[in-house]
Image: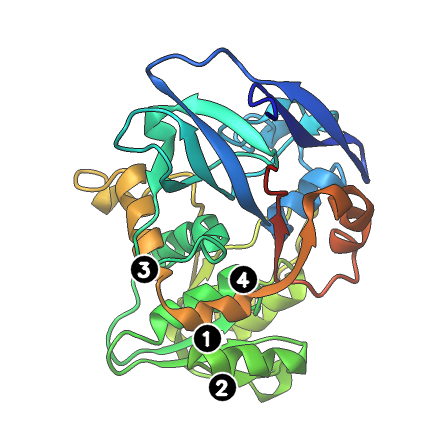
Amino acid sequence: MPRTDTATAFWIVRPGVGELRPETLEPFTRDLVQVRTLYSGVSRGTESLVFNARVPESEAERMRAPFQSGDFPAPVKYGYCSVGVVEKGPEALLDKTVFCLYPHQSRYVVPLEAVVPLPEALPSHRAVLTANMETAINGVWDANPLPGERICVVGAGVVGALVAYLCARIPGTRVHLIDINAERETLANALGVAFCTPENAPADQDLVIHASGHGEGLRLGLSLLGNEGRLIEMSWFGEGETRLALGGAFHSKRLSIRASQVGQLPAALQSRWDYRRRLTLALELLKDPCLDHLVSSECAFEDFPALAPTLFGLGSQALCHRIHYPVPE
């Protein structure tokens, strides 16, 4: 019989280099669950910054993942999109498929409250998008789009695409997903959202949500706003700096820029919502099969270290990358 008290984890051992390392699991007790991983997902934007050692010292504590080991820049075990089966735990959870904000690791032991069972209609392979959906939900809450508004989402990565998908389902909205990569039109069509490249982007927008991760996208977003328009900034630039021209129309149009960050619930919702309720909502919203289009590539866990430098490189066009784990014999 295979041992269930050991595991294998992906560690970033130095900037731009990862490897698989053995792990010994903590002793199992009644208030814990042990999970065997089926899939994990790569949140490429944030994990690229971690993999390439671009986390600013000022943000090192705020950037820690819930079950991170090690410290930035390296060695560090990082990630937060894990789906697996409970192999030890209370009877109500035993053999259930669950989501957990855990790094890339073949098995792990966590407190009971750290896992959330998947809804019956949600396949485990799609649930790797859960953390991205949480981020999108929080961004839409912060943006507060209204019925009938003209909305542009700049950046057709996973988070931007999910934000556009959610906004397009508000009655009467006219939503455009914008990206420099014209091939992302196929993704937009699959999600039921209009698409355009920057040179064809509509002007006089009520709301722009920026999720491209590039300063050019932020500058484009501001240029698309109409009078009293608002821009929600969802990109995180790490150690980079972004230049904005805030003269000219920025003041005369009374434009506004507001940050959105998934680590904090909007103040107006904090009396009724908590992180678990938001996570449960994210799982429910992932039942739509069209969201499978957001997973653009997949590999076996054993192949991940060799693939990581390309996946996290500057020229990468990957959306969500899914990792599948071996089935025990």
Using the numbered discs, state the Cα–Cα distance from disc 4 to disc 1 in whole angstroms.
Answer: 15 Å
The answer to whether 91 appears left or right of 180 in the picture is left
For residue 167, what is the image quadrant? bottom left
Q: Between tags 2 and 3, which lies in front?
A: 3
The answer to whether 83 appears left or right of 75 in the picture is left
Q: Residue at x 68, y 77 (%)?
A: 181
Above or below 14: residue 261: below
Task: Report helix, strand or loop for mark 1.
Answer: strand
Q: Residue at x 47, y 58 (%)?
A: 126
Residue 158 is labelled as 4
Query: Crowdedness of circle 1 by 10 Å Cα count: few (<14), some, many (20+)?
Result: many
The answer to whether 243 appears left or right of 266 in the picture is right
**Which residue is at the front of the view, 43 or 73?**
43
- Please report contact status of discs 2 and 3: CB closer than 8 Å, yes or no: no
Q: Name the residue tied to disc 1.
A: 152
Give how far across and how far down residue 85 sits, in percent.
44, 38
Give how far across and how far down residue 103 sits, in percent.
58, 35
Q: Name the residue tied to disc 2.
A: 202
Q: Which residue reaches farthest left? A: 272
Q: Earlier in the sequence, mark 4 or mark 2?
A: 4
Q: Between tags 4 and 1, which lies in front?
A: 4
For residue 60, what is the image quadrant? top right
- Please report contact status of discs 2 and 1: CB closer than 8 Å, yes or no: yes
Q: Looking at numbered disc 2 in the image, what kind of residue is underneath it? A: Pro
